[in-house]
Image (cartoon, helix red, strand yellow):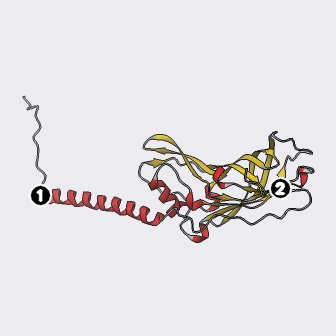
Amino acid sequence: MEFNGAMKRVPLPLKTLKAVGALIGVTILLLAGGALFIWVSGGSAQPSAGISAPGLQVSGSARLFHIDKARSQVRFVITETLLGQPKTVIGSTNEVAGDIAVDFDNPANSQIGTVRINVRTLQTDNEIRNRTLRGQILQANRPEFEFATFVPRRIVGLPDSLVEGQPLTLQIVGDLTAHGATRSVTFDATVTPVNRNRIEGQARATVQYQAFHITVPDAPGVANVAQNVVLEIDLVAVAATSSR
């Protein structure tokens, strides 16, 4: 018995071809419509107003410092799998404000005021992701979700004395409000009183975004989005009477 090694091509009926073409067309339209929705719903990263935070009242020998947003940055860091490859996503903004009161004579009296961040202005390395953040994840295009705030309640680790230029290792315990939800968060911080006119610091905490009623929608090519998000801040604060 002999077989012909070549397979015959059986033409698809015209009706089937039209159905396949229609399905492809619908799929393209859905993808295009989804992309258009993300683009439009994400709105603009333009803040509604200049960043500000409630002022901190100081007394005694404490010295007031303001966070200098031009030399400060707030970030989130989260991991995912993008197109089959591990990806670390970093979003950052310098739209941050807040006050710090440092008592160089009695450090235990030092305070940190409310820190306010405009999450609408967070930027990653991809504009589609930025618009998805604003429109669907953080929903920061809505006025009630534009800002996140951190209200410190306790500073752990303040020393008995301060030495200019010597870093301090602290824990800052407070209430973080984002996306309409408030949770207690502890930041591990390193703060350096550079001199009596300048404070520098870094702080870091890990939270679960779901605790703030935030959801991450499914997206083509994106998988394994971590539940934990690392929050970081690098700050420079200058004395209220100084510009250095």
151 versus 156 height, above or below: below
Residue 178 seen in the figure: no
Q: Secondary structure at mark 2?
A: strand
Residue in the image at 11% along x and 43% along y: 9
Mark 2, other Cα within 10 Å: few <14 / some 14–19 / many ≥20: few
**Residue 168 placement (x, y as % from top left):** 81, 42
The quadrant in which the N terminus is found is top left
Q: Total label count?
A: 2
Residue 163 in which image quadrant = top right
Q: Residue furthest top?
A: 1
The one of 81 and 17 positioned closer to us in this rendering: 81
Q: Nearer the viewer, residue 121 or 206?
A: 121
- Give residue 14's mark: 1
Residue at which label 2 appears: 154
With 56 as the anchor, is 122 left or right in this view?
A: left
From this viewpoint, is residue 197 visible?
Answer: yes
- Residue shown at the point (42%, 48%) measured from the top left: 221
Residue 122: which numbered mark, if any?
none
Q: Nearer the viewer, residue 203 or 34?
A: 203
Verify CB contact (< 8 Å) between mark 2 and mark 1: no
Query: Given the image, on which type of amino acid does mark 1 rest?
Result: Leu
Vertical relation: 159 (above or below) 239? above
| Kind of residue at badge 2 | Arg
Q: Quadrant of residue 240?
A: bottom right
Point 81% across, 40% down: residue: 165
Q: Is residue 124 above or below residue 39?
A: above
* 125 to the left or right of 150: left
In front: label 2 or label 1: 2
99 vs 15, nearest the viewer: 99
Q: Residue 149, percent across and down?
A: 69, 62
